[in-house]
Image (spheres, rainbow, N blue to C red):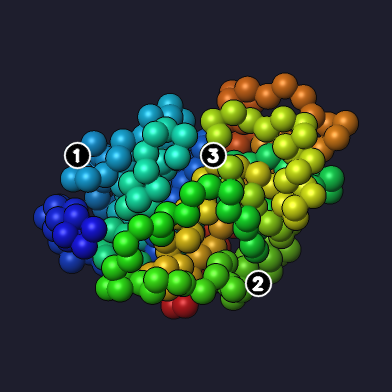
């Protein structure tokens, strides 16, 4: 793993030099337009980066962007990888390892998710303050102590300071925003009514197919994390209806300006975090 990370970083640095991004951002389904807010300095296609997977999902562009947002240097993944695409957990989370080696100090993750909390509506944002992992853990297998401990603590998977700052920002700019627990499943099927009830019963507020593996690996390397979901469909009794990926993309696209504003301001006010 260390040698793969080193080789990938050397390749990237041959293009970007000693750029050293402070923030890492992973953009989820239908949420790639945040890149339009970034002053881009460098852009690399995933297919050209050694040992990087290539996204097979049409709504994920597949570019690694280096640039500045709100005056801060960052690296953004315009498109992520999922377990349902057939990749291993180690492949899915490899880019997070690379971003750490490139110098990031914090990680911001976004996703589109189904809301199972009855208080949520399509288009709402939810700041993730905890998660339940129903996917294989990406740390299964031999542990390299150079990357992190064998048994990493997960008492604070999402950084409390960043959450508090985001809640304050949402109030100031008038964004309807909740806090809650995200449940990660494998997909690619959307959930049955019984599965929605189960997710709610075990303590979930939203459900999706990503985010948690990346956060686990980031915390393994002691990177503070912030994550936000856009509610794109509802898994609440009486509100469940047939949903297509186009419906999810449309809902994500409509709510994306709110998420973009929240992330931009979060980075601006926490630039020296």
161 horizontally vs 270: left or right: right
Image coords of residue 111 (percent x, y): 56, 45
> Which label belongs to residue 186?
3
Count of marks, rendered view:
3
Image coords of residue 8 (percent x, y): 19, 53
| Of marks 3 and 2, the one in the foreground | 3
Distance of mark 1 from mark 2, alpha carbons?
38 Å
> Which label belongs to residue 48?
1
Asked which secondary structure carries label 3, the reply is: loop
| Of marks 1 and 3, the one in the foreground | 3
Placement of 95 over or under 185, stated as above or below: below
Please state which of residues 205 and 264 is positioned toward the viewer in this rendering: 205
Q: Residue at x 45, y 72 (%)?
A: 151
Asked which secondary structure carries label 1, the reply is: helix
Please state which of residues 173 and 272 is positioned toward the viewer in this rendering: 272
Distance of mark 3 from mark 2, alpha carbons?
30 Å
Distance of mark 1 from mark 3, alpha carbons?
27 Å
Asked which secondary structure carries label 2, the reply is: helix
249 horizontally vs 90: left or right: right
Query: Which residue is disc 2 drawn over?
Result: 164
């Amino acid at each position: 793993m260390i040698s793969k990370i080193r080789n990938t970083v050397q390749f990237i640095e041959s293009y970007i030099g000693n750029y050293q991004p402070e923030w890492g951002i992973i953009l989820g389904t239908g949420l790639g337009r945040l890149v339009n807010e970034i002053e881009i300095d460098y852009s690399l296609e995933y297919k050209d980066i050694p040992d990087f997977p290539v996204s097979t999902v049409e709504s994920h562009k597949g570019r690694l962007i280096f640039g500045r947002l709100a005056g801060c240097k960052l690296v953004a993944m315009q498109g992520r990888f999922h377990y349902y695409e057939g990749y291993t957990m180690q492949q899915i989370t490899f880019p997070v390892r690379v971003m750490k080696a490139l110098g990031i100090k914090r990680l911001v993750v976004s996703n589109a998710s189904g809301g199972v909390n009855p208080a949520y509506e399509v288009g709402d944002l939810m700041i993730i303050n905890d998660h339940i992992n129903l996917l294989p853990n990406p740390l299964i297998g031999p542990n390299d102590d150079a990357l992190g401990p064998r048994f990493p603590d997960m008492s604070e998977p999402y950084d409390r300071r960043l959450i508090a700052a985001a809640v304050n920002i949402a109030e100031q700019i008038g964004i309807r925003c909740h806090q809650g627990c995200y449940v990660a499943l494998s997909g690619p099927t959307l959930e049955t009514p019984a599965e929605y009830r189960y997710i709610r019963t075990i303590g979930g507020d939203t459900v999706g197919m990503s985010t948690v593996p990346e956060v686990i690996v980031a915390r393994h390397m002691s990177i503070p994390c912030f994550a936000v979901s856009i509610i794109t469909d509802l898994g609440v009794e009486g509100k469940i209806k047939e949903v297509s990926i186009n419906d999810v993309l449309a809902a994500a696209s409509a709510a994306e300006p709110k998420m973009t504003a929240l992330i931009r301001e979060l980075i601006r006010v926490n630039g020296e975090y």
